[in-house]
Image (cartoon, rainbow, N blue to C red):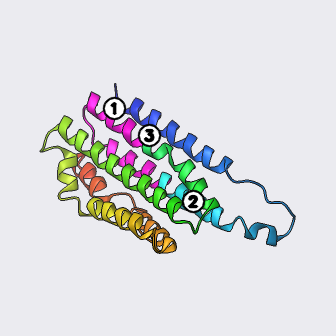
Amino acid sequence: MGKSRLEAFSDGVLAIIITIMVLELHVPRGNTLAALHDLLPIFLNYGLSFLYVGIYWNNHHHLLHTVHRVSGGILWANLHLLFWLSLLPFVTGWMGENHRAAMPVALYGVVLLLAATAYSILEWAIIRADGKASLLAQALGKDIKGKLSLAVYAAGVGLAFWVPWASQVLYAAAALMWLIPDRRIEQAVSKEHGES
């Protein structure tokens, strides 16, 4: 399988995830701005999850630029990532409806943690298929940013049982950390193609 087919499939799944999330936004009863007040936590959670899906889509796109050979391991690792991302609409809705409750906030963090872990596994599968001297291995180095993200999600999950809003701040901070696509990969791909 070529990487373009893998990317197209992943793009389709991510588009469906976003569509499902937006369908969970219900029209308020009433025709004033006050009617929107109760929807604010739901909309903020939707915005955060939309941002996360966008970040994964963008970084996944850059990640696949490093792939030279799509192996069975890469296919399964990619499906593993998509599985965890497909749970975002559920945990987004639950957290939005119960934005100050510990368990929905913690479960949201668990899904983020497992999606980030799956992304790391996908990176490992690509490196395994292309070799330790591969473009991706060189670009990632020690992957401090990836490891820091995992620690932030884990901290958010634990903190949710004491201060749920602080967990949500951690989740948003981790999203901001990844807002700009991974420049290490962009630079490695440009260098390989002889671009400046």
Amino acid on which disc 3 is placed: Phe
Quarter of the picture containing the C terminus is bottom left
Region in magenta? 54-83
Q: Nearer the viewer, residue 188 or 180?
A: 180
Amino acid on which disc 2 is placed: Met
Q: Quadrant of residue 3?
A: top left
Position of residue 147 relative to residue 63, above or below, is: below
Q: Position of residue 16 (x, y in %)?
A: 57, 40
Residue at mark 3 = 83
Relative horizontal placement of residue 154, taking residue 163 as reference (left or right): left
Q: Nearer the viewer, residue 155 or 186?
A: 155
Residue at screen point 27% across, 51% down: 190
Residue at mark 1 = 75
Q: Residues within 10 Å of mark 3 (few under 14, many from 20)?
A: some
Q: Is residue 94 magenta?
A: no
Q: Earlier in the sequence, mark 3 or mark 2?
A: 3
Q: Nearer the viewer, residue 153 or 174?
A: 153
Q: Position of residue 185 (x, y in %)?
A: 28, 53
* Circle number at residue 95: 2
Q: Position of residue 70 (x, y in %)?
A: 28, 31
Q: Earlier in the sequence, mark 3 or mark 1?
A: 1
Q: Quadrant of residue 64?
A: top left
Give the CA distance from mark 1 to mark 2.
Answer: 31 Å
